[in-house]
Image (cartoon, rainbow, N blue to C red):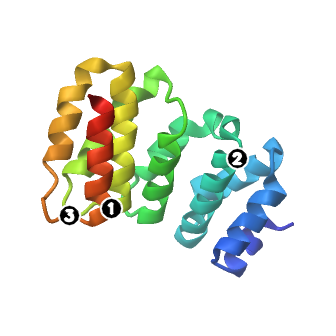
């Protein structure tokens, strides 16, 4: 399979799942996907992000060697929101290595305080911060403040996530 042409062929859930199934637990195929995600042109990176997310859900061990590069990628200027959204979503479900925790926490706080951050990125950031705060209890107060700082007229989904995360921090 020519991975790049398959990614560009169609942007759909069906296609993303099909490619993720083809990758499966194969580290070589996943490395090909990561090369496209990390160095591809914007449209390829955007679509690859979704597939990376699906693969990481099925097999979190595949993404671990790439965590630092993935975190750097989502910080690049002009990167598509889909990249940030999918990376932060992945970070909710994996154990973040201690050496990356500070950087991830800083990014998630930035997303929460940013009026321009997409709702999904904010919601996922709340969960990532709560997970970090469980390992670093000194952060709980700061996480609560960041969540409580969200505008009261935020989306229903974001408000529900905020209530859930605040409850988990008690």
Which residue lies at the image location 44% right of the left edge and 28% below the top edge? 100
Location of residue 68 with respect to 57 vertically, above or below = above
**Mark 3 touches mark 2? (CB < 8 Å):** no
Q: Residue 58's mark?
A: 2
Report how far apart the C-alphas of labels 1 and 3 lie in the structure: 8 Å
Q: Nearer the viewer, mark 1 or mark 2?
A: 1
Element type at mark 2: helix
Element type at mark 1: helix
Q: Is residue 86 left or right of residue 127?
A: right
Q: Which of the two discs, 3 and 2, labels the residue nearer the N terminus?
A: 2
Q: Which of the two discs, 1 and 2, labels the residue nearer the N terminus?
A: 2
Extreme bottom residue here? 10
Image quadrant in which the N terminus is located? bottom right
Q: Residue 157's mark?
A: 1
Q: Identify which residue, 36 or 114, lies in the foreground.
A: 114
Report how far apart the C-alphas of labels 1 and 2 lie in the structure: 25 Å
Q: Identify which residue, 86 or 14, lies in the foreground.
A: 14
Element type at mark 3: loop
- Let me know if residue 96 appears in the view: yes
Q: Residue 154's mark?
A: 3
Q: How far across and how far down the image is residue 73, in percent?
A: 48, 49
Which residue lies at the image location 45% right of the left edge and 21% below the top edge? 98
Q: Identify which residue, 156 or 47, lies in the foreground.
A: 156
Residue 62 appears in which quarter of the rendering? top right
Q: Is residue 111 left or right of residue 53?
A: left
């Amino acid at each position: 399979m020519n991975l790049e042409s398959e990614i560009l062929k169609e942007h759909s859930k069906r296609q993303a799942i099909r490619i993720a199934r083809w990758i499966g637990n194969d580290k070589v195929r996943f490395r090909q996907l990561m090369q496209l995600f990390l160095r591809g042109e914007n449209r390829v990176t955007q679509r690859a992000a979704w597939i990376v997310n699906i693969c990481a859900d099925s097999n979190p061990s595949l993404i671990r060697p790439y965590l630092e590069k993935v975190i750097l990628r989502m910080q690049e200027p002009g990167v598509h929101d889909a990249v940030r959204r999918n990376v932060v979503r992945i970070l909710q479900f994996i154990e973040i290595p201690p050496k990356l925790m500070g950087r991830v926490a800083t990014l998630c706080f930035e997303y929460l305080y940013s009026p321009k951050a997409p709702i999904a990125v904010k919601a996922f950031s709340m969960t990532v911060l709560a997970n970090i705060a469980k390992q670093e209890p000194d952060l709980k107060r700061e996480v609560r403040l960041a969540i409580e700082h969200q505008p009261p007229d935020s989306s229903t989904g974001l408000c529900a996530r905020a209530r859930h995360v605040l409850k988990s921090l008690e």
